[in-house]
Amino acid sequence: MAKENEFKVGDRVAWRGPGTIRGRIKEQLTAPMEIKGHHVAASEENPQYLVVSDESGEEAAHKPSALRKVD
């Protein structure tokens, strides 16, 4: 898995869901927020990433450890 400083907006990534999901990094999250009714405990020290699925177009937040870069 990649470290948090390895991702930037626009990077293509994959993560596990029902199968492997691919998408793009839309934004680095560095403050707590709610996404689709779920609390995202992001902070400057523990950033998370807002990703957009290529297939569904849906947004989700993931910890860096859940993402891997793809071509």
Image: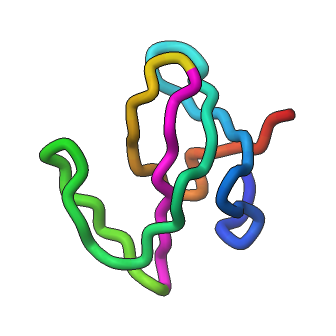
Q: Main secondary structure of the magenta part?
A: strand
Q: Position of residue 50 (x, y in %)?
A: 46, 53
Is 51 left or right of 3, judged from the image as shown?
left
Q: Classify the position of the C terminus by image quarter.
A: top right
Q: Residue at x 71, y 61 (%)?
A: 7
Q: Is residue 30 inside the magenta stretch?
A: no
Is 3 left or right of 29, judged from the image as shown?
right
Relative to 61, does residue 56 appear above or below in the rendering? Answer: above
Q: Which residues are magenta?
A: 45-54
Q: Is residue 47 inside the magenta stretch?
A: yes
Relative to 30, does residue 10 appear above or below in the rendering? Answer: above
Relative to 5, does residue 10 appear above or below in the rendering? Answer: above
Q: Position of residue 32 (x, y in %)?
A: 27, 73
Q: Position of residue 35 (x, y in %)?
A: 24, 50
Q: Position of residue 41 (x, y in %)?
A: 30, 68
- Looking at this view, name the residue that lies furthest to the left: 37
Q: Residue at x 65, y 67 (%)?
A: 4
Q: Residue at x 65, y 33 (%)?
A: 14
Nearest the eye: 36 or 48:
36
Nearest the eye: 53 or 15:
53
Is 66 left or right of 34, judged from the image as shown?
right
